[in-house]
């Protein structure tokens, strides 16, 4: 039996630990607050000059850049986060002035040098700065950092390359999806997609990569960036790729692109005998495609014994407009197939209450 003394000691110990933790948290918050106030105080004298710089004419900008660039290290360290935040909010002449400020102060050259630093935080910080500045000359060095031993540095390099929008970096970004040191697919997808049309050609080259993950990411990028010129290549992937996940992504991308060439391969993908996951995504893609010619094939899926597939087909029919709604109403009135009628009625009721809503599981999870 536990003695009262042991219980008392345990309670006192827990109270002491709780008090220490509370004091520690309060101390940390106090230090952080002091540092914020100190930065604001140091930056206050030049923050007004920074605002003037953003609004100044070309003739006045150089003088203001000189005044701000020649501030001491502590003042620049306090001001630099504000300058970095402004880089993402302004464009044109104001953004050019901020980039010149980085150059004049020497921070740009320092960031380039820090890419080779032994310190992982400094390498990551340098990558962030060069990305914000969109300094394309740093692209080769940033590509090398995709193989950095530190995970966070690799992430920072990938994001920076996305901001540089240099299509020559695409193969390096795709290569970083596999190997001993990788970058997460979501980071690579976002980085490459941010490059826009210029990246379509090197991204499409990734469709022939032996690694399924590279092909899947390439397809995702082409779909989200609206690369309609690459529809034939995506059709080929949907028909012939050996990897199921890659085929699923191709089906989803064809639905997003909305080109007529996607109709036949998507119809083939929903036929019996195809993997269920592919059939579900392809059915949803046909709804996005908006092809009335898919009405009959989707209607036949309403009675499928897989509820997820039947529900996706019903919602896809709603996306087809009047033809799809007519098919759903006819199915809802047909008493010969209770399952199809139930799915049709559910879709019509959902549309009446909240409008058409694409099956999130078919679009995202699969």
Image: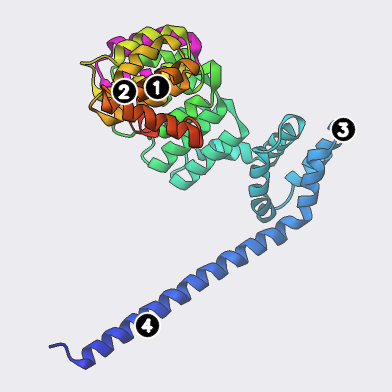
User: Neighbour class for label 3 at 10 Å: few (<14), some, many (≥20)?
Assistant: few
For marks 1 and 4, give the CA distance. Answer: 67 Å
Secondary structure type for disc 3? helix
Task: Please give the label number shown on residue 16.
Answer: 4
Which residue is under mark 2?
A: 302
Tell me, yes or no, whether the two marked residues, 4 and 3, touch with CB atoms within 8 Å.
no
Residue interval drawn in magenta: 227-253
Which residue is under mark 1?
A: 328
Which residue is under mark 3?
A: 59
Tell me, yes or no, whether the two marked residues, 1 and 3, touch with CB atoms within 8 Å.
no
Which of the two discs, 2 and 1, sits closer to the camera? 1
For marks 2 and 3, give the CA distance. Answer: 70 Å
Which of the two discs, 1 and 3, sits closer to the camera? 1
Indicate which disc, 4 or 2, sits on the residue closer to the N terminus.
4
Q: Main secondary structure of the magenta part?
A: helix
For marks 4 and 3, give the CA distance. Answer: 64 Å
The quarter of the rendered structure image containing the N terminus is: bottom left
Q: Residue at x 22, y 92 (%)?
A: 4
Figure colour scheme = rainbow
Q: Quadrant of residue 182?
A: top left
Secondary structure type for disc 1? helix
User: Neighbour class for label 4 at 10 Å: few (<14), some, many (≥20)?
Assistant: few
User: Neighbour class for label 2 at 10 Å: few (<14), some, many (≥20)?
Assistant: many
Indicate which disc, 1 or 3, sits on the residue closer to the N terminus.
3
Q: Is residue 231 visible?
A: yes
Q: Quadrant of residue 329?
A: top left
Tell me, yes or no, whether the two marked residues, 2 and 1, touch with CB atoms within 8 Å.
yes
């Amino acid at each position: 039996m536990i003695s009262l003394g042991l219980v008392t000691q345990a309670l006192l110990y827990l109270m002491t630990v709780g008090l220490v933790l509370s004091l520690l948290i309060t101390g940390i918050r106090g230090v952080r607050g002091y540092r914020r106030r100190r930065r604001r105080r140091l930056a206050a004298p030049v923050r007004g000059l920074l605002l003037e710089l953003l609004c100044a004419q070309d003739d006045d900008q150089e003088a203001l850049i000189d005044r701000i660039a020649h501030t001491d290290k502590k003042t620049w360290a306090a001001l630099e986060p504000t300058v970095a935040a402004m880089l993402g909010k302004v464009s044109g002449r104001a953004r050019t002035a901020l980039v010149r400020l980085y150059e004049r102060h020497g921070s740009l050259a320092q960031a380039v040098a820090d890419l080779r630093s032994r310190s992982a935080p400094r390498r990551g910080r340098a990558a962030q700065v060069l990305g914000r500045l969109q300094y394309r000359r740093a692209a080769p060095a940033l590509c090398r950092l995709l193989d950095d031993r530190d995970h966070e540095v690799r992430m920072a390099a990938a994001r920076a390359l996305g901001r540089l929008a240099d299509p020559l970096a695409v193969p390096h970004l795709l290569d970083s999806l596999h190997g001993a040191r990788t970058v997460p697919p979501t980071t690579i997808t976002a980085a490459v997609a941010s490059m826009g049309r210029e990246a379509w050609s090197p991204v499409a080259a990734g469709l022939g990569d032996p690694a399924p993950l590279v092909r899947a990411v390439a397809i995702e990028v082409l779909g989200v960036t609206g690369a309609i010129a690459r529809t034939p290549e995506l059709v080929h992937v949907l028909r012939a790729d050996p990897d199921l996940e890659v085929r699923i992504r191709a089906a989803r991308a064809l639905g997003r692109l909305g080109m007529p060439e996607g109709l036949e391969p998507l119809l083939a993908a929903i036929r019996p005998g195809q993997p269920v996951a592919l059939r579900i995504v392809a059915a949803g893609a046909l709804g996005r495609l908006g092809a009335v010619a898919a009405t009959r094939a989707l209607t036949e899926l309403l009675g499928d014994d897989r509820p997820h597939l039947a529900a996706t087909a019903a919602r896809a029919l709603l996306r087809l407009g009047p033809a799809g709604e007519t098919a759903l109403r006819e199915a809802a009135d047909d008493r010969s197939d209770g399952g199809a009628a139930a799915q049709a009625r559910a879709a019509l009721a959902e549309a009446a209450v909240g409008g058409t809503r694409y099956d999130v599981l078919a679009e995202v999870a699969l």
